[in-house]
Image (cartoon, coloured by chain):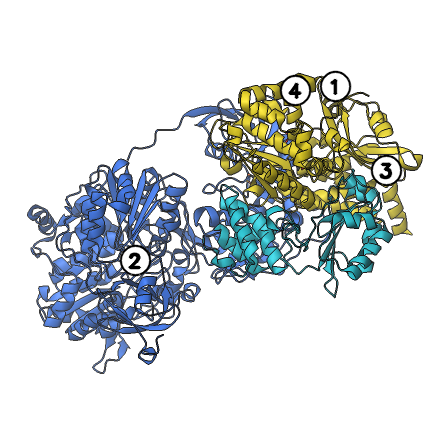
Amino acid sequence: MSFPLILTERMTQHPSDSHLIQRYESTGGYSVMRKALGSLQPADVIEQVKTANIQGRGGAAFPAGIKWGFLAPAEPRYLVVNGDESEPGTFKDRQLLERDPHQLVEGVILSSFALGVNHAFIYIRGEYPKPARRVQQAVEAAYEKGYLGQNILGSGFDLDVTVHLGGGAYICGEETALLNSLEGRRGEPRLKPPFPAVEGLYAKPTIVNNVETISNIPWILENGGAAFAAIGDENSVGTRMFSLSGHLKKPGNVEVPMGLTWRELIYEVGGGIRDDRELKCWVPGGASAPWFVPEHLDTKVTKDDVAQAGSMLGSGAVIVMDETTNVVAAAHRIVKFFAHESCGQCTPCREGTTWLERILWRLLNGAGRPSDIDLLLDVCDGISPGLAWPPKMTTICPLGPSAVSPITSIMTHFRDEVEAMIADSQEVANA
Amino acid sequence: MPERPPPEMVTITIDGEEVQVPKGELIIKSAEDNGTYIPRFCSHDRLKPVGKCRMCLVEVETPRGRMLTTACNFPATDELIVDTQSDVVQKAQEGILEFLLINHPLDCPVCDKGGECPLQDQTVAYGPGESRFVEEKRHFQKPIPLSEIVLMDRERCILCARCTRFSEEVSGDPLIEFVGRGNHTQVITFPDEPFASYFSGNTVQICPVGALTAKPYRFKARPWDLEAVESVSMVDASGASISIEASQNEVLRINGVDNDATNHGWLSDKDRFIFQAVHSDARITAPLIRDHAGVLHPASWGEALDLVADQLGSVRGDEVASIGGANNTNEEAFALGKFLRTVVVTPHIDAQVGDGVNPDFLAGIAPRATINDLDRADTILVWAGDLKEEFPSLFLRVRHAVNEMGAKLIVVHPRRTGLDEIATEKITYRPGDGSEVLRKLTAGEDQYASARTLLTEGSVAAVIGLTGRAEDPKTIDAIAGYVTALPNAKVLPLARRGNIFGAIDMGLAPTLLPGRVPVSSEAGRNELEGFWGPLPDTEGRNTAEILSGLQDGTLKALVLVGADPVRDGHNPGVAREALDEAEFIVSFDMFLNDSNQHAAVILPVDGFAETEGTVTNAEGRVQKVNRIAPGPGQSRALWSVLDDLSVRMGGQLAAGDGQTIAKEIATVAPAYRSLSWDRLEWGPERDGVVMPDGDGVQTLQYVPTDEGLRKAKGRLTLHSGRVLYDGGTRVSQSPALATLTPDPAVHLHPRDASALALTEGQDVDVIGELATLRLPLKVDPTLAEGAVYVPANLDSTWMLGAPDSVAVEPRPEDKGSVK
Amino acid sequence: MSMAVISDWSGPNQERARRLLDSYPEKRSAVMPLLYLASLEHGYLDAPGMTQVAELTGLTSAQVQSVASFYTMYKRDHVGKYLVSVCTSISCFLMGADDVLAAIEEESTSPDGSTSADGTFSVEHVECIGACGGAPAVQVNYELIEGVTPEKGAGLCKWLRDAAPAVVLADEMQELFGSIRSFDWGSKEADGAVAPVPAFGPYGSAAKDGKS
Ligand SMILES: Cc1cc2nc3c(=O)[nH]c(=O)nc-3n(C[C@H](O)[C@H](O)[C@H](O)COP(=O)(O)O)c2cc1C
Ligand code: SF4
Ligand code: FES
């Protein structure tokens, strides 16, 4: 595998000070910003991002260039960087925020310049005070250098950046909930349309992008969109941060080009299963994603291949479970997460996820009934009719339907284990 | 004000049928208007969609295939295809109901909402048969009070956000909110900050389940036992539509009715709960005659009426005067006016009880605005009392016009009003300085320049009334003169008392005959004489002149009709002396009060919810009020009593019944030629009819003049402003409201307070001509400098009356001890 | 803006509040950071704190309470000196987080969701805190430790009780009680937490306060 490290090169080379502006600048940082503000038109920047064909790294994998094209002309416009990263299994943005905050800040400057934005926000989850401190320090350093503020480097371009700390709510990662939260409201997702590109923050046109998406922008502009598009697979390009966790020998964040197989990612990059046990299953893209089992090992790690196999790459979180795993307990943990994080607006999400959690809890505690399997699936059906992927939704946002994934996963791949668990309970009850 | 252009229509398909609907109309409404009801909980026509209960799911065809969406927030676009019945939709609806019910207590038999509960109804219509939920339900402590009036049963709440949206969007007092998240969410207040909203009852009405209940109605009845009639609230002259619900002759509940023209369905808590006074034990239930010792004795109607006829007949007609009649129906007011002008033969008739607003302004201002004109105006000028306190449902309409329709708002008032927070411009002035404000506005001087621009550049709806009791009523003519000279303005006139506009239109004014005909118009008078025979040809006295006439003996007898000039007038001292001097007073009333203490005869008459007829609001809109309960004891309809009295006095009222009177009104009152009860019943015109309409003619040309406008005199001028929950009889006889009357304070501007060396909270003496009040001091930076604000008509303030100027001093015992 | 309403806040925090209100196009946006300031000032987010934030932002107290209660990090009840948050979400669960929680509950004498009698600890289980590669993960006053075992979790509590650090530093705790990490943390950081409120930027990083 030969590929450039787009996001993690600096921190790998300079572990002690990659977060400081001196190091950032001494390794070429902020030079592309000087160039862009001095000699490029906003449209040129957008063009490069479109050419790069970079898919958003926040979960939905929507091409960033196309999203930018939707931004409505009204003024003012805003850019919001989504650093809420709270999907179980995901911790890649934390590394980018903490270890190379200037890369993000430069990305914010370039993106704002391209989008005609004069005030950008970086929303960081509340449980990330250290990354937030680092980003805040980076922003302050950039102000001191005149890279932020009024008339940046004499270009006539103004930009303010506000770092905002969340309060502990996964749902604020959903972009419209995030905007509500940033407005000082409950983090409840909004009805769409209108989409943020038309009516976002303070009802003004707003682009929301993930930390990793924006962190790629300086490299794209420095090396050209085409260079980015040349890395990786046909349709899923560039490198990507994967957060590996669970029963692996080498868990942790990795930056790899798109288009490996799952086998390569799990067994080579992730070092294989701890104690060389058998792989039982894995969550391929964060807690919301339907699970994969060994038969998917040779599927390619791209948006389209994973979708075709019935799941998603999502936030890039790979959670690996070995043969010893009680899959009902694992599913219960994930469902419990969604029940805890439901904003509570939608009846099916609020009531349905809690109900699912309580049924699974009953199963785990030896009080399962044979009818519970149908009941679980039927409650899921009430949240996500048809139980298809991508899900049909009775809800405003995909959080509710996300809680369905672990249940359909265990019912598809491990129904016998669920049935056995219920049978055991019945035996105990009848004994 | 230009009418809005008609909406563009698009064709959509609902369940296979093509229909035409306005572009952008929400599917839920488009479907309902075309006969398909989509079930819902959170959606409410007057609130912004939140799409959160998810009950209204439908399927729509999109380029990417069929998609589930909520109908309550999905706008109609051309060629949209909607399926409200598909298997997926039905399954989803069953699912939502099951989800809602898993935590909902099944206590329907003891729930106020049982029988009229959408959750109950929809479960029957769309729900699954049985619950598969075997876990324990969510539990909360049983009903907790959110305020003195509203209780919350959190277990029943389905988190539809109707109540919270109402409070935030409509009434602007977000005191109840969601707390917690997800399955732990509940609706509640901040600790120790109750849901003290003037509009809290609306949340009870729109709660789709029995989570919010109102103390006055709680456990009182089952919905299926209730009988209902539509009517109009008589709390103020905005004409809010209501339904009155009763069981076994007892009024138990009032709900708002959605009238596009007036209240949009909303009511203040005063409109909603004041009905309690109807069944108060303090109601007079039999005619009362005062003996020589001053003690009241019940008497028969015959005995009492004989006495009244005898007494009124024993003096010259023009020695009799009448005060009141503004809380009655048009038909009653008309009968009263006819009785006074043709049987007693007196011109001294005044329904305003001393407010003294030029009746020509109230009946004849042109061009006159409708309430809906607020929604069409570029700018709204409110130069009147604090609408939140005095005209609460109009207050909500102004909020709506500003917040939803984008109108700019200018408020002119002596102190902070409920509208200030949404006002573009606020002009604070001292009562008495009105002409000064007008001069500066006209000139566009300094801080008035932007207000002037707003008033001269676009369409204006001006809401004009007295800012307080101590304001010179002529101020209104001056403002009207200014506003009618603006290039594009209409005026909505305001005056207090529920049917004051109807009373004046029916001729209960010293200068006006029925149907807005000036007494001074010979042609108009002759026309009426053609029906009624000879009439007094001079203008009569207004309340102030009536009182002085009683004092100086030029008047001898007084008819009080639901009026209490002692408590409710400008000068309680003068009023009391005048009533003492009167040789004979008869009072038609529901209650004993400070004025009919002086009456020789008190006759019980029917009141709110006990009479059928029409009323007229500030727009001139006539609406029907209806009867659902009989008056207590021997109480009778006013017109029928007057009928009997006329016969005894050798006259002829020929009132017959309310409907007969309405027909006579249509015959003799030019502006009301098109009045007919049939038009006002349920049907296309149930929103009421603004008079004149059809055959009706406006015969009155009001020409504003500001002659003799009083200038402020004295160091401190009084601003005597009304509060919603005053010390009036009806509030004090309604247990739900009586506890809500505020504790008064006297307000001074900080500079005046410091000039007088007074500090916040200290007890001070407010010294007026008639009385001295001892009240705590509130330093109020929102008050005009040089003004003293004292809330009017509270038990502890009414004695002050409404003198122009007052003095504020430390208590004698505090004098000299000042730092 | 009347700053009088927060006159019981320290001078630096009044200044921070002012700056926060200036950092956003609309002052309502400052609600969340102001809630952290109010929590820092009063030890937790009490009713007066919420009312102060309401006055600063032009909201009602009920609206502020509604916002605050949506998020898990605004503690509306007393919190111990050290808030120990144990992640029990899926990745940490797979790696034995429940045992870590049990050990911490025992050593700190505060069962999940409670505060120890001496006010030293509050213990809570939390959903994913973004340290899954270093599972099981624990936070003390939101400063992170990765790769915690039950023994090390208990040791952490003992150390907190005995050493009673005024400023909690992630690097220090990681060295003493952590093991595997989600990624190389790079250089050590002098900033840490001074209270069970996330310390960050304009509203309370220990280093910026000159307290470390
Ligand atoms: C429940 C939910 C949680 C989400 N959480 C995150 C998150 O933590 N971080 C993130 O960047 N995107 C998250 N997203 C996706 C965002 O809504 C949005 O698509 C993304 O920030 C856009 O950025 P991108 O186009 O650069 O990927 C979440 C979406 C949902 C529905
Ligand atoms: S699906 Fe759940 S989290 Fe999403 S908006 Fe609805 S209730 Fe909130
Ligand atoms: S009525 Fe549409 S979601 Fe509630």
Instruction: Report the chain shown in yellow.
Output: A
| Inter-mark Cα distance, 4 to 3 | 35 Å
> Looking at this view, is B82 or B170 the one in front?
B170
Q: Chain of mark 3?
A: A
Q: Nearer the viewer, mark 1 or mark 4?
A: 4
- Amino acid type, residue under disc 2 in the picture: Ala
Labels 4 & 3 near each other (Cβ < 8 A): no
Q: Secondary structure at mark 4?
A: helix
Callout 1 crowding tier (Cα within 10 Å): few <14, some 14–19, many ≥20: some
Q: Which mark identifies residue A233? A: 1
* Closer-to-camera residue (A312/B728): A312
On the rendered image, what quadrant is the N terminus of chain B found in?
A: top left
State which chain disc 1 sits on: A
Residue under pointer 2: B784
Alpha-carbon span between mark 3 and mark 1 = 27 Å
Real-space CA distance between mark 1 and mark 4, rounded to the nearest whole angstrom: 13 Å
The answer to whether residue A55 shows anywhere in this view is no
- Same chain shared by disc 2 and disc 3: no
Q: Which residue is mark 4?
A: A52
Residue B292 higher or lower than B337, as above or below: below
- First reached walking from the N terminus: tag 3 or tag 1: 1
